[in-house]
Image (cartoon, grey):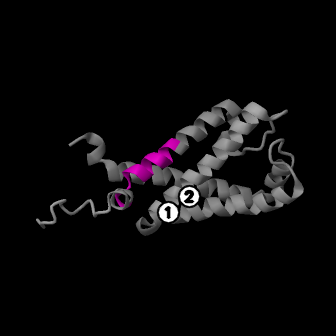
Amino acid sequence: MKWYQKYRETIVEVICLLFITLFAYAGITKLLEGHLFYDNFRNSPVLGGKAMASLASWAVPLSELAVALLLIWKKTRLMGLYGAAILMLLFTGYTLAIVFFAPFRPCSCGGVISLLSWEQHLVLNAILLLLALLAIWYSPKHKKNSMGQDPSKPVDGHGV
């Protein structure tokens, strides 16, 4: 048995803990400092605008908190991992747009992330996106759904 098969569940749980921490911290921070997040979003060279900023200033942190909650329980974990992957895809796309297409680069991140350059932030987002996809791939429910069978039961249908 390969090492990653043996530790698959542990790998998924560690990745989930990482995302729970990240999204809970980010969501709470954005809600507590809502006016700053709104202003940064409104002044964004890529997605700027009052209507978009109003929507995003609530939708982004609430989505982050919802995904963190989904990741806590095993029953909803796979849905949470898909949510994490979607959020990281959106955040990575936004960071790509800032790095390659924006006429200027705003400083809108808080906490430790504010110490990173936009290029480093892009690499971090890409790594987090890959981790979300890896956790989905290693998730036992994903294996069950993609193979059309329960991975804990033998393929020949005979019990143990």
Q: Observer-nearest residue: 111 or 61?
A: 61
Q: Nearer the viewer, residue 144 or 17?
A: 144
Q: Is residue 136 magenta?
A: yes
Point 59% across, 37% down: residue: 124
Do we see residue 103 in this rendering?
A: yes
User: Can residue 21 be seen here?
Assistant: no
Label disc, if present, on residue 83 of the rendered structure = 2
Task: Name the disc covering residue 31, or none.
Answer: none
Q: Which residues are magenta?
A: 130-141
Q: CA distance from mark 1 to mark 2?
A: 6 Å
Give the image location of residue 153, x and y in percent: 21, 63
**Which residue is painted at 54% across and 65% down in the image?**
69
Look at the numbered discs 1 and 2 and tell me whether their residues touch, using CB distance below 8 Å: yes
SS at mark 1?
Answer: helix
Q: Main secondary structure of the magenta part?
A: helix
Residue 15, percent from left and from top: 46, 49
Taking the spot 61% from the left edge, 47% from the top edge, the residue there is: 89
Return the mark for residue 79: 1
Task: Tell me what residue is drawn at x 83 percent, y 61 percent.
Answer: 54
